[in-house]
Image (cartoon, rainbow, N blue to C red):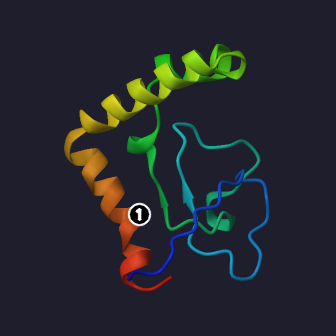
């Protein structure tokens, strides 16, 4: 049996506490007011972010509708599936800390 995996979603402005694990940024745009040198990120995984069209849908319709959320999820997974080598490389980057036991 494998070790349980815990993924915590945080905003980049939130401090990382002791035992906070490996941090990745999954966003198309760098956040204002955050220095890249101080962000303590393992990687910036732009290929895993939704397209601009899906991002706008997420921030618009999904907050008010379960059906819109389901449609977003399906479309996002389809984008990831079609993402090719960039997406595979980003996913491999996510797996490195697991292989190292972190």
Q: Quadrant of residue 84?
A: top left
For the residue pair 89 and 101, the one nearer the viewer reads as: 101
Q: Which residue lies furthest to the bottom in this view?
A: 101
Name the residue at 37% across, 73% down: 96
- Where residue 45 sits: x, y (%)? 45, 51
Q: Who is closer to the viewer here, 71 or 38?
A: 71
- Foreground pick, 29 / 98: 98
Horizontal arrangement in the rendering, residue 65 relative to residue 93 (left or right): right
Outermost residue, front side = 1
Q: How crowded is mark 1: few (under 14 residues within 10 Å), some or many (20 or more)?
A: some
- Indicate whether 67 appears above or below 44: above
Q: Where is residue 12 in the image (x, y as percent from the top left)?
A: 70, 53
Taking the spot 27% from the left edge, 46% from the top edge, the residue there is 86
Does residue 14 appear left or right of residue 51 in this picture? right
Q: What element carries label 1?
A: helix
- In the rendered view, would you say 6 is above or below 102? above
Q: Residue 97: where, in percent of width, then height? A: 44, 76
Residue identifier under label 1: 94
The correct choice, above or below, for 95 with respect to 102 in the image is above
The answer to whether 90 is drawn above or below residue 92 in the figure is above
| Residue at position x 36%, y 80% in the image | 99
Work out whether residue 8 or residue 89 is closer to the camera in this orientation and state it.
8
Q: Residue at x 62, y 69 (%)?
A: 40
Residue 32 placement (x, y as % from top left): 72, 42
């Amino acid at each position: 049996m494998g070790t349980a995996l815990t993924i915590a979603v945080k905003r980049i402005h939130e401090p990382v506490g002791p035992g906070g694990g490996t941090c990745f940024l999954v966003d198309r745009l760098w956040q204002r007011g955050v220095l890249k040198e101080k962000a303590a990120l393992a990687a910036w995984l732009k290929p895993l972010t939704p397209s601009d069209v899906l991002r706008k849908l997420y921030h618009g319709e999904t907050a008010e509708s379960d059906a819109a959320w389901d449609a977003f999820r399906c479309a996002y997974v389809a984008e990831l599936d079609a993402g090719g080598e960039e997406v595979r490389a980003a996913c491999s980057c996510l797996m490195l800390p697991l292989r190292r036991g972190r």
